[in-house]
Image (cartoon, helix red, strand yellow):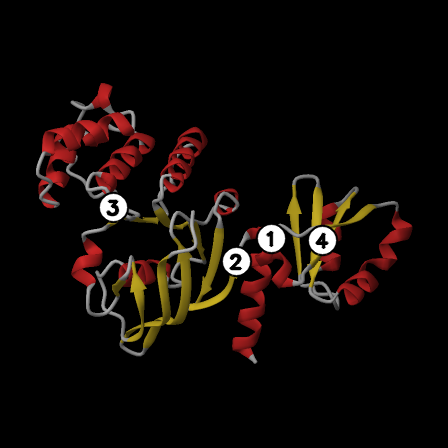
């Protein structure tokens, strides 16, 4: 990772009729950085990715992607981007090797045979190269999709929820490969709903209703939220959670295994709400909030602002 910017855009906006899908988003991503793009379904993440790689033209905004103007040079950007969509889009009645050869043809790669072989070896697909894509499990389909995205040696990789429906082992192997690629200088922008995956990213951006609510490293995003969180252990936690929900200073109550996480953005008001519990024999301690606590907090706060 270095200080040059692979993505440097400002005011990126996309409208579909009266609906604003992406609302004046500014984003900078350094070369070799893995940037996690988070937000609920329908928040505008996929639309933003498609604008970056030239599949959608922004209605407003400006900037560069890989040094090319996002408005005027979308064709140049497309040639240097690998885009892995949410849905498996390859030919299920073709083998792995045939699918990769087709991808190489699409990118007009001169020595297709060498490119396909290199992709098979890079993603550990050589032993399965004759297997039909339709017979593959979710994890192997994911490897094929990634191999196809990389076959033309892109400088930027856009991954749209790449591990949805994939087992934990395949997910870990996938992220190991992504970090290896980033270490070689490839820039990665990845959307995900998994908090453990978000924590694997160098930097995060959280989008809701088309607006960027926060961005930075994991530590910076948590610090910016200024959220106080207490962990409570003891009997009858379900009933306790119901008692606490809605009290002044209590913004959210969530079960985490055998404990409750109780959070609020006013530490003193939150402590006052929890003070009566000190005499009930419960185990209570102040803890650092997690990403899930922070993102739920941001979502709730945004909803409150809309309703005002």
In the current view of this chain or complex, which residue is farthest to the front? 3
In primary-sequence order, the first of circles 3 and 1 is 3
Q: Which residue is drawn at 42% across and 38% down?
A: 179
* Distance (Cα) linking label 3 and label 4: 49 Å
The image quarter in which residue 133 lies: top left
**Helix, strand or loop for disc 4:** helix
Kindly indicate whether the residue at mark 1 contacts the one at mark 3 (C-beta within 8 angstroms): no
Mark on residue 216? 2
Q: Which residue is drawn at 25% across and 34% down?
A: 144
**Helix, strand or loop for disc 2:** strand
Label 3 or label 1, whichever lies nearer to me, is: 3
Q: Where is residue 191 in the image (x, y as percent from the top left)?
A: 40, 51
Which residue has dot 4 on it? 241
Kindly indicate whether the residue at mark 4 contacts the one at mark 3 (C-beta within 8 angstroms): no
In primary-sequence order, the first of circles 4 and 2 is 2
* Distance (Cα) linking label 3 and label 1: 30 Å
Label 4 or label 2, whichever lies nearer to me, is: 2
Kindly indicate whether the residue at mark 3 contacts the one at mark 2 (C-beta within 8 angstroms): no
Which residue has dot 1 on it? 219
127 on left or right of 171? left
Label 3 or label 4, whichever lies nearer to me, is: 3
Kindly indicate whether the residue at mark 2 contacts the one at mark 1 (C-beta within 8 angstroms): yes
All told, the count of numbered labels is 4
Residue 95 visible? no
In primary-sequence order, the first of circles 3 and 4 is 3
């Amino acid at each position: 990772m270095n200080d040059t910017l692979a993505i440097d855009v400002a005011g990126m906006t996309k409208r579909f009729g009266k609906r604003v899908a992406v609302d004046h988003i500014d984003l900078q991503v350094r070369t070799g950085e893995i940037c996690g793009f988070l937000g609920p379904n329908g928040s505008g993440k996929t639309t933003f990715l498609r604008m970056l790689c030239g599949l959608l033209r922004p209605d407003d905004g400006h900037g560069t992607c890989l040094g090319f103007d996002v408005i005027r040079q979308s064709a140049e950007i497309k040639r240097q981007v690998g885009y892995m969509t949410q849905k498996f889009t390859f030919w299920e009645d073709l083998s792995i090797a045939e699918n990769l050869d087709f991808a190489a043809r699409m990118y007009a790669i001169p020595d297709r045979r060498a490119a396909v072989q290199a992709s098979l070896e890079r993603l550990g697909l050589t032993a399965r190269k004759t297997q039909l894509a339709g017979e593959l499990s979710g994890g192997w389909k994911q490897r094929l999709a990634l191999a196809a995205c990389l076959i033309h040696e892109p400088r930027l990789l856009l991954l749209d929820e790449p591990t949805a429906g994939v087992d934990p082992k395949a997910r870990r192997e996938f992220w190991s490969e992504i970090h290896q690629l980033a270490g070689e200088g490839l820039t990665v922008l990845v959307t995900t709903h998994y908090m453990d995956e978000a924590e694997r990213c160098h930097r995060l951006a959280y989008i809701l209703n088309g607006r960027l609510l926060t961005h930075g490293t994991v530590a910076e995003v948590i610090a910016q939220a200024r959220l106080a969180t207490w962990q409570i252990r003891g009997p009858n936690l379900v009933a306790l959670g119901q008692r606490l929900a809605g009290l002044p200073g209590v913004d959210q109550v969530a079960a985490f295994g055998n404990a409750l996480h109780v959070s609020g953005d006013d530490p003193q008001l939150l402590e006052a709400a929890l003070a009566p519990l000190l005499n009930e024999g419960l185990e209570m301690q102040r803890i650092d909030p997690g990403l899930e606590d922070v993102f739920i907090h941001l979502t709730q706060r945004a909803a409150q602002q809309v309703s005002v």
